[in-house]
Amino acid sequence: MTRICIIVPAYNEQDRITDTLETYINFFAVEPKGRRYEVDFLVVLNGCTDNTRVVVEKLCEKHPNILLYEIKQAGKGVAIKTGFEQALEGPYNLIGFVDADMATSPSQFLALIQNMGNADGVIASRYMPGARTIPERPWIKRWGSRFFYENLVALLFGIHYYDYQCGAKLFKRSVIVAIVPHLTVTQWAFDVELLYWCKKLGFFIKELPSVWHDKAGSKLKIFGSGLPMLIALFKLRYRIGKDAKK
């Protein structure tokens, strides 16, 4: 039996997280292929100001495989790193994360598990051939990613993927043990830093086309997020270069 910890970073998700967690739990309970795995869900609250904690506590009473951890600092990056650290205290073979809005369905996350094979990790992609987004993403968002962001990341960090930011990734335990001490980004560019260290440390990460359901209420906006993301990338490149000179 493969034991898996799926981290769910949650920032003010009181209205969506119940549906996400119960859908995932029910799927892995009844799906024949899913029953090959023992899955726990670690919800990491980060800087919540709504009733997400109360909602998740009620779910924990109902489902023993939902775990709860809270930090005061907001930020997806710090939430996932904290989740990684907590997961390493458990007996998990595979450790990953998924967004709380269920843009990635349980069946699509199962595909990551089933396609691990000899890879060290598998990441979902919204943009590689064979992937779909429902509804189709605005052309300006895809254009910005394809012709600018992806090329910039490749130039600065020497890594090449169709999609760095998709919120569904899964790794073998050995990967998490190795990369956690290096993770510093608390918010923007966290995924890039994670994938950079995977390559730097010699891990093979497979990219898998996925079906992505774009959800209303996303924390990442088409306009307004571009500049902070670029600043975060250059700060990360500077910090990595500075550390390499020590």
Image: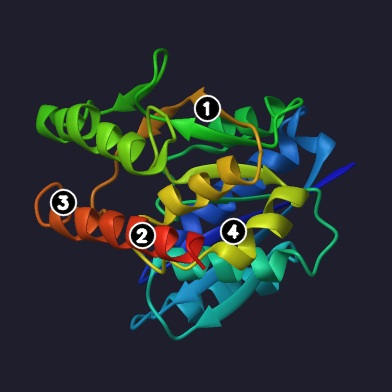
Sequence-wise, the earlier of marks 1 and 4 is: 4
Q: How many marks?
A: 4
| Mark toward the viewer: 4 or 3 | 3
Residue lying farthest to the right in this orientation = 1
Q: Which mark is residue 226?
A: 3
- Residue 231 image point, x, y percent: 21, 60
Q: Nearer the viewer, residue 102 or 221?
A: 221
Question: Is residue 4 rendered to the left or right of residue 166?
Answer: right
In the image, what residue occupies the spot 60% across and 77% down? 69
Of discs 2 and 4, which sits in the foreground?
A: 2
Q: Which kind of residue does numbered mark 2 sit on?
A: Leu
Query: Which amino acid is tagged 4?
Result: Ile
- Crowding at label 1, few (<14), some or many (≥20) Cα neighbours within 10 Å? some
Structural distance between the alpha carbons of marks 2 and 3: 15 Å
Residue of label 1: 207
Q: Nearer the viewer, residue 46 or 161?
A: 161
Residue 42 visible in this rendered orientation of the protein: no
The residue to which callout 2 is attached is 236
Q: Which residue is mark 4?
A: 7
Distance CA(mark 1)–CA(mark 4): 19 Å
Q: Which of the 4 image quadrants contains residue 36?
A: top right
- Label 2, label 4: how far apart the Cα atoms are: 24 Å
Q: Nearer the viewer, residue 116 or 43?
A: 116
